[in-house]
Image: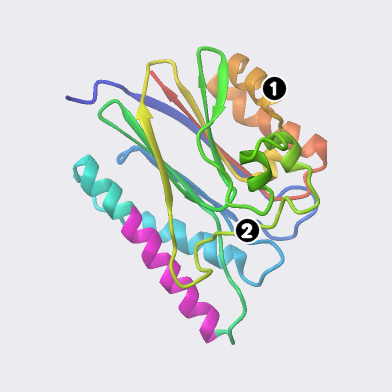
Amino acid sequence: MTNDKTYRFAAQTHVGLKRKVNEDAILALPDHDIWLVSDGMGGHQAGDFASALIVDTVASLPLGLDPAAKMHGLRDRIQNAHHAIQAEAAARGGGTIGATVVALILANGHFVCLWAGDSRIYRLRNGTIEMLTSDHSAVADFVLAGKMTWDEADQHPHANAITRAVGVGDELELDKVRGMVESGDRFLICSDGLTKYATFPILQEVLSTAPLETVGHRLLQIALEGGGADNISHIIVDVI
């Protein structure tokens, strides 16, 4: 099956209103049909180092790989970043350095999401939004058990306590979901600096109504007007 779909995208990252450093990093590789967001762990030293290292490592992926090789190459580079971040943390005296990662790959009419942490991928299809990833966080178990919604979890006092990150722990386990792509699908890849302020209904409304040229700005304004307490990053990918 050949890939007869084309994609358009918009990408944006912003330091927000409260932080001095942007610890988020974003990567758009349209020649690979890969898009990625990484959020350096707040409160830890060198979160910006960790997210930048992930982006730089993935950006070295060679062109011309078939879809399976591309996915394996992406996984391998994230694992390489995991070990490099750990080595840097040890060189700095053993403090924790880490970052979330979430990546979208499009190939042959399919999508694949890979992630660790609480950065997210949503898909808008036929006017309805769906969260494709599932946070690795202290409150995610409550959501998965049906005790609260993701929107409620975003406001929980322990919402920022993530249980998985690149650079943290001996082994890095990346979760994966995959599925079919349809023309008209719109994907949103983002850090929690957006989803703290943009609930499912808000995201559904904005993603359903705003053209690609302005949707990123609208999402950024929602986060800034909500308080902009964290760095804000998002990539919107439209399937033509």
At label 2, the amino acid type is: Glu
Kindly indicate whether the residue at mark 2 contacts the one at mark 1 (C-beta within 8 angstroms).
Answer: no
Residue type, mark 1 in image = Pro
Within-10-Å neighbours for mark 2: few <14, some 14–19, many 20+: many
Seen in the picture, residue 130 relative to 36 is either above or below; the reply is: above
Q: Which residue is mark 2?
A: 23
Q: In the shown orientation, is residue 33 left or right of residue 131?
A: left
Relative placement, left or right, of 81 versus 196 is: left
Name the residue carrying label 1.
Answer: 201
Tell which circle, 1 or 2, labels the residue nearer the N-terminal end: 2
* Residue under the point 26% across and 47% down: 70
Image coords of residue 59 (percent x, y): 37, 54
SS at badge 2: loop
Q: 199 or 222: nearer the eye?
A: 199
Magenta highlight range: 75-91
Q: Is residue 177 magenta?
A: no
28 sits left or right of 128 in the view: left
- For numbered disc 1, what is the local secondary structure? helix
Give coordinates of residue 13: x percent, y percent: 61, 45
